[in-house]
Amino acid sequence: MNSTFNISLISIGDELCIGQTLNTNVQWMSKELVKVGANIDYHLTIKDDKAEIIKAIEFLKSSSDVILVTGGLGPTHDDITKKVLTEYFDDKLALNEKVLADLKEYFKTRGRDFLERHYEQALMPSRCKIIENKVGTAQGMLFQGDGFELLSMPGVPREMQYIMSNNFIEYIENRIKKNNHNVIVYRTLRTAGVPESTLADLIGEVGFLNGASLAFLPSYAGVKLRIGTNSENFDNAKIELDKLEKFIMDRCGKYIYSNSDENLENYLASLLLENKKTISGAESCTGGLFGAKITAMPGSSFYFNGSAVTYSNNAKIDILGVRKETISNFGAVSEECAKEMAIGSREKYKTDYAISITGIAGPDGGSESKPVGTIWIGLSSSNDTYAKKFVFTKDREVNRELSVHNAINLLVKEIEKEVGN
Amino acid sequence: MNSTFNISLISIGDELCIGQTLNTNVQWMSKELVKVGANIDYHLTIKDDKAEIIKAIEFLKSSSDVILVTGGLGPTHDDITKKVLTEYFDDKLALNEKVLADLKEYFKTRGRDFLERHYEQALMPSRCKIIENKVGTAQGMLFQGDGFELLSMPGVPREMQYIMSNNFIEYIENRIKKNNHNVIVYRTLRTAGVPESTLADLIGEVGFLNGASLAFLPSYAGVKLRIGTNSENFDNAKIELDKLEKFIMDRCGKYIYSNSDENLENYLASLLLENKKTISGAESCTGGLFGAKITAMPGSSFYFNGSAVTYSNNAKIDILGVRKETISNFGAVSEECAKEMAIGSREKYKTDYAISITGIAGPDGGSESKPVGTIWIGLSSSNDTYAKKFVFTKDREVNRELSVHNAINLLVKEIEKEVGN
């Protein structure tokens, strides 16, 4: 069996270690590198500290073909990565005229002054290969180590992504092909409306896997089944994964809505576009999260007209036409209110389907009959209007996320039913 | 100088390494542990693999007082952490009657069947200390190593947080006090409306810092200035940080709206509550993100009435009363439309202040005169109605985040002006 192409990631920054910043870079890099078949081994986060940087490289270099380093390349005093790496690779910093000219141009086109402190960004290790960064002032630097390469990039997500996307991922893809490395390939089967244990029981023994892998990933947005394989190439991987997918589909296919990394919002979007249908929302406890999730996707204006966030009772009455008596008799968190909110949204926004969400997200506001976590989700279409009750958790954020996921799932099921999928 | 109390984190899970799951656990743990003065050194993410788990512990143990491990404790075949740790610490698994009884109770109160596979969750390393998890089936396990301790927890955020909050953070706090460890203390000064370089120039030389640290953290939500100190105790740390804060306030105080970790939404909330004012929104390209951010805070119903997400032109006309001619003459992304949206929202939701956001988030929909990233933010109050133009980036997500941040900042400035802060 050929070896895989192994990549490890080092993130440098005190703000990451102390939890002030969420490390989204490693997720982005890993996702993109997995697409070209690379094997991602370690993510290591350390401080802006010389000894820690050296210790990290020493720890990872023997198992890595490439080490990707982000962070510590800014122009302020706490950024030491360039200096430490230059020393580690026994190199010297020298003014790079090309980088200097590009930098001056960069500032000029942005109408900003080129300051004394920016000269430092043009000092480069003399032997490293420069990987261009056109969206920031710190360039990518590719160092040659003993049996491994190390790419240093800025920690600003947009700049790291620029360097990776415009140059480096393709470079890695080519190396994997040229050296006949095995590829690691994953596929995700996404389920909705079924607990992990039921899926595990339906799929049964996994002894048949034979080198391939199966993992269960439960989340608020449904359980994902991840299947993976270590194969000689992408064609072989596809054959392996197809076989495994069929095995699983035969056992619990009815719960699986997608075999790609598309999420439920993407799937809803394709359903709506195919059937030329439009949607709108009416939100109370989610406060706009439903609309925000739907409109996170480019092109959502083709099927999403809007969502009335009606947080106060008066807003529900004035904007959505919920009847005063409905709220005084049943409360805002009720089947009746959810239904009237959905009807109001469909009428106001002139859509085919409207979804409403009203509930007690918490931490306060619960009662014995309506504890925190009680959420009514309403749906109105030209065929029918109904509402469904959910009782989620005591956690505000979880309740809001689960509300949106279940609202989208309800929409999907209704549209599938009506269009006969 | 006394030593700090050093903690390192190991996250176990293929889904983290390959970027399928964003690692939010390490941020949460680090944040909470920093509050009690601990020094957080390394975050290391590895696969569900025996050799990698052992290699990770070996790498971290000499520099750590405590290693926190999350993940790999589920009931499925890919979860191997318990087995590997038991072996590593030279222990044996044995049925723990107390854990078994608790587990059976756990399933009973949730109306779920206790299955054969759940027995395994009651097998515990005989010598480890069990740290109770009442919100899941895998218990925390505290192992004694040679000069370090290791706590193994499930990777499910809610369960990890339960174990940490109900028991373990206090345990660490006590150890820091009892052994007279130095504490690491941070404070964040939050700025709005000013670039990093201007701040750096205003603050000037940092030679005065004398053991304390200053870091610049730019983000879409404004630049944060983090000051930190390594002190004998929290009282001394406060003196140091007060001194440093004063130095900075003297130089750029007008840009600083908070010296706590409260964000701009929290600050807006306190302004609104103090002055008994209400707000509402009118959103186009942000699709509900403004409302979602405002309502992420418990208690937002005291000042937030709602937000009309009007994604289509018709919705803007029907729901917010934007005039047809305004859209046909100036387009939906215009000063005029933004103003009418804000006026409409204030009238419909009967609020003191309304904010509107209309723009081209991208990636498509731009033109020469209105490129992607062009956003109009409108504000309407009883005093005034106006709109401000922003040109952000080419990135949809960034544009949406920046729109919401700037909308909140505009609100803050307007309210401060009107109430005379």
Image (cartoon, coloured by chain):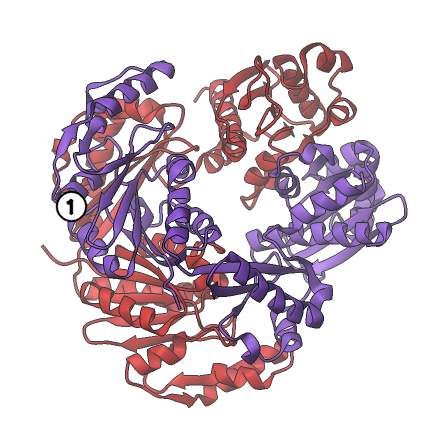
Chain colours: A purple, B red
Position above or below: B156 against A276: below
Position above or below: B120 against A102: below
Q: Position of residue B148 (x, y in %)?
A: 22, 71
Question: Disc 1 marks which amino acid?
Answer: Phe
Q: Nearer the viewer, residue B1 or B56?
A: B56
Which residue is outermost to the top?
B329
Residue B128 in sight from this viewpoint? no
Quadrant where the C terminus of chain B sits is: top left
Residue A342 in sight from this viewpoint? yes
Q: Position of residue A227 (x, y in %)?
A: 55, 65
Quadrant housing residue B364: top right
Residue drawn at (39%, 40%) of the image? A164
- SS of the residue at dot 1? loop
Quadrant housing residue A269: top right
Residue drawn at (50%, 86%) of the image? B100
Q: Is residue A245 left or right of residue A145?
A: right
Q: Is residue B35 left or right of residue B58?
A: right
Residue under label 1: A89
Residue drawn at (81%, 32%) of the image? A348
Quadrant where the N terminus of chain B sits is: bottom left
Q: Position of residue A363 (x, y in %)?
A: 57, 54
- Dot 1, how many residues are within 10 Å of its Cα: few (below 14), some (14-19), or many (20+)? some
Q: Nearer the viewer, residue A48 or B15?
A: B15
Q: Position of residue A219 (x, y in %)?
A: 57, 60
